Image (cartoon, rainbow, N blue to C red):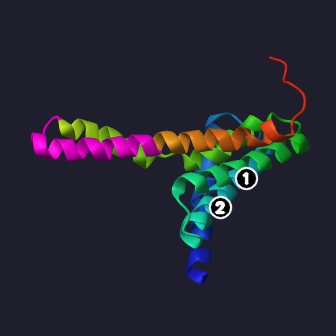
Amino acid sequence: MIELLGLMLQDAFWSAIAALGFALLFNVPRRALPYCVLAGAVGHSTRLLLIDGFQANIVPATLAAATLVGFIAKYCARHLQIPSMIFAVCGAIPMVPGVFAFQTMLGILQIIWLPVDVAADMLVIAAINAIKTGLLLGALAAGIVAPTLLFERQQPVV
């Protein structure tokens, strides 16, 4: 249990750094930076807790963590009078499935140089990684917009 807590604190720290970096890249107002950092740290460490602590699959864990980030974003948006997507995107960026997307592309490129019998296995692995990437991105999107879909009664003016 103490190992998991230490791992979560370390994960929260690095996720906060990633969220801060993207918040600075997106020119987020200074007063919103701590909340972006909080959203990134809480979101990613929640996903880690669900995966390592409760042995959840990565896709539902990502959906739950992204939903939490969406609620944090809505709260911060009302508190600071800033659009919620600022907090939601910065909080969700550390959970983007870059490893699975990279493994998909690497597998597809390796198929060119492999013999036919091995290439079929590599194609299956690349397809699994591509599907997992798509599911994770869908879970992030659904989780971020869930609070808006559930609790906002007005249609936004476009």
Relative depth, front residue between 24 and 109: 109
- Does residue 3 lie above or below 143 as drawn? below
Percent x, y for residue 13? 61, 62
Taking the view exactly as shown, the residue that stands out farthest to the left is 115
**Residue drawn where x is 79% and y is 36% of the image:** 149
**Residue drawn where x is 57% and y is 39% of the image:** 138
Percent x, y for residue 83? 80, 33
Image-based side of 136 in relation to 29, left or right? left
Image quadrant containing the C terminus: top right
Image quadrant in which you'd find residue 141: top right
**Residue 68 has which mark?**
1
Which type of secondary structure does the marked residue at label 2 adopt?
helix
Badge 2 or badge 1: first in the primary sequence: 2
**Residue 16 in sight from this viewpoint:** yes
**Residue drawn where x is 56% and y is 49% of the image:** 95
Q: Read off the residue under disc 2.
A: 46
Is disc 2 in contact with disc 1, using a CB cutoff of under 8 Å?
yes
Distance, label 2 to label 1, CA atoms, is 8 Å
Report the span colored magenta: 112-132
**Residue 114 in sight from this viewpoint:** no
Taking the view exactly as shown, the residue that stands out farthest to the bottom is 2
Relative depth, front residue between 142 and 103: 142
Percent x, y for residue 43? 66, 55
Q: Amino acid at mark 2?
A: Thr
Which type of secondary structure does the marked residue at label 1 adopt?
helix
